[in-house]
Amino acid sequence: MLIEKRLETIMFAVKRHGSLSYEEAIQLTGCSKDTARRDFIKLSDENLVTRTRGGILYKDSSVFDYDKGYSNADTRIQLRAEADIPTIKNFDKKQQIGKLAAHMVRGCRTIMVDSGSTTLSMIRQLEKQQDLTIITNCLRIANELVNRPDIHTIVLGGDLNSGTLSIMGYDALHMIKHYNVDTLFLGTAALSIEKGIMTPYSIEAMLKREMIASANKVVLLVDSSKIQKFALYSFSELTNISTLITDENIPSQIKERLETLGIEVLIAKKLK
């Protein structure tokens, strides 16, 4: 089993059960004990787990809980706009961020929109556009654009993630290489000054890298609960981001560090 797949398998198991022994890792991945030990060390170095004498513990105090942006109130992913409002985590903050991001679409001719509950909020608040093309890997976003004849929508093809209704995989990677867009509106699972922008999944990391490469400008939409948290795969340095839109709860020292890196930090205010 490739190292990326092993690490994903181990992280899934330790998150689900809270702990994982060497013997359990060996049984799950088919690797040797020495390999399991190296994998545990790597995950510990990434601040994702805590090592113990017999294995590892899930370090949930410092790791972003990758839950697709939804609470446990309803695990079903809905396509209808009105159905999922009560289940979106930090709904008000994401609405604020989405509204500010929607204003930035003005004047763009082509944009790419990543999957996620915050980018979905942005799409729902878009004003009428002229000659706008939106490329997305998210079926929920595409569904929102069905009744927008003013917008030309392109949906990436590939493997469907039934949990998030997003498209990923090598076909999607190949398609992105054909496009050049004015602005990418990007979502993420976690962000830190030290590790950059992160996701729990290797295939998603590859897709996001290609999205960034296709854009002249990258706008990252992230609520403050994801800042200074960690996930398994870093897919971009912070310096690839032009603008970060977040909420008022971002720590002031983190905001200052981001601005020192040349990143424009926009704070979305409460909606009136």
Image: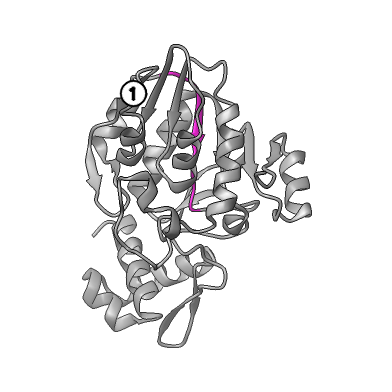
Secondary structure at badge 1 equals strand
Instruction: Check the picture and name the quadrant holding the N terminus.
Output: bottom left
Q: Is residue 64 visible?
A: yes
Residue depicted at 45% across the width and 47% down the height:
117
Residue depicted at 52% across the width and 63% down the height:
46
Residue depicted at 32% across the width and 58% down the height:
3
Name the chief secondary structure element in magenta. Answer: strand
Examine the rendered structure and indicate whether residue 269 appears above or below residue 34. above
Instruction: Check the picture and name the quadrant holding the C terminus.
Output: top right
| Amino acid, disc 1 | Thr
Range of magenta residues: 180-189
For residue 113, side relative to residue 219 (left or right) = left
Q: Is residue 196 visible?
A: no
Q: Which residue is mark 1?
A: 153
Q: Tell me residue 45's x, y (percent).
A: 53, 66
Q: Nearer the viewer, residue 138 or 234?
A: 138
Q: Tell me residue 18's x, y (percent).
A: 40, 80
- Residue 23 belongs to the span the image colors magenta: no
Locate residue 141: give its quadrant: top left
Q: Nearer the viewer, residue 112 or 268?
A: 268
Examine the rendered structure and indicate whether residue 68 appears above or below residue 204. below
So how many labels did they put on this image? 1
Q: Tell me residue 173's x, y (percent).
A: 31, 33
Residue at the outermost bottom position? 53
Name the image colouring.
Answer: one colour
The crowd level at tag 1 (other Cα within 10 Å; few <14, some 14-19, many 20+) is: many
Residue depicted at 43% across the width and 28% down the height:
112
